[in-house]
Image (cartoon, rainbow, N blue to C red):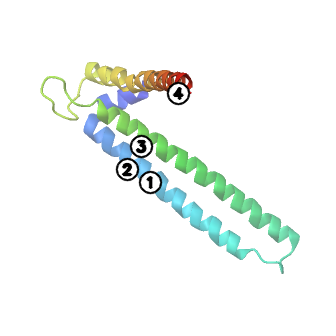
């Protein structure tokens, strides 16, 4: 419930803004790590010793791991912010980002979990539709 506590403490708009800023900082970090990887690869040549080659390759692999971790964190933060932003409109007045109380934050948490069930029912519906079209095609042939 850290998210609920943070939204309750900061307000939804400031929490949302901080999620976006933190996510984009991870994106910048991933980009800088990618540049470091590419410069490390550029340092590789056949005139260096195998130990130097190994060190450079280990550093490149560590940089690649950092890129993947930062990219995953960026995507997680952006998805979380989008999920909460979709449920942030007040049902009565249609004002966006208005929840200030713990009750409204808990309502946001409940509505934020709804897209998962909707996507699973959407997946089930698409499977049923593909089965129906396959059976139609098989009866036609």
- What separation in Å lies between label 4 and label 2 (alpha carbons)? 51 Å
Above or below residue 122? Residue 66 is: below
For this orientation, the residue located farthest to the left is: 93
Residue drawn at x 38%, y 22% is 114
Task: Say which label, 4 or 2, has the lower sequence index.
Answer: 2
Residue 124 point in image, percent of width and height: 48, 21
Residue drawn at x 31%, y 25% is 108
- Residue 112's disc is none
Indicate the secondary structure of the residue bearing disc 1. Answer: helix
- Neighbour class for label 2 at 10 Å: few (<14), some, many (≥20)? some
Q: Dot 3 corresponds to which residue?
A: 78
Q: Dot 4 corresponds to which residue?
A: 137
Residue 86: quadrant of the picture: top left
- Residue 25's disc is 1
Residue 75 point in image, percent of width and height: 48, 44
- Where is the C terminus found, in terms of image quarters? top right
**Camera-side mark, 3 or 4:** 4
- What separation in Å lies between label 2 and label 3 (alpha carbons)? 10 Å
- What separation in Å lies between label 3 and label 4 (alpha carbons)? 41 Å
**Camera-side mark, 4 or 1:** 4
**Camera-side mark, 2 or 3:** 3
Task: Say which label, 2 or 3, has the lower sequence index.
Answer: 2
Q: Dot 2 corresponds to which residue?
A: 21
Check contact, mark 2 vs mark 1: CB within 8 A.
yes
């Amino acid at each position: 419930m850290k998210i609920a506590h943070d939204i309750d403490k900061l307000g939804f708009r400031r929490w949302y803004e901080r999620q976006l800023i933190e996510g984009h900082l991870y994106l910048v970090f991933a980009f800088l790590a990618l540049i470091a990887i590419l410069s490390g690869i550029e340092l590789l040549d056949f005139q260096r010793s195998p130990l130097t080659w190994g060190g450079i390759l280990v550093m490149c692999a560590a940089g690649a791991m950092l890129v993947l971790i930062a990219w995953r964190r960026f995507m997680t933060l952006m998805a979380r912010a989008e999920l909460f932003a979709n449920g942030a409109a007040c049902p009565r007045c249609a004002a966006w980002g208005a929840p200030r109380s713990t009750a409204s934050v808990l309502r946001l948490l409940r509505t934020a979990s709804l897209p998962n069930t909707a996507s699973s029912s959407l997946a089930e519906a698409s499977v049923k539709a593909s089965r129906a079209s396959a059976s139609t095609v098989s009866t036609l042939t």
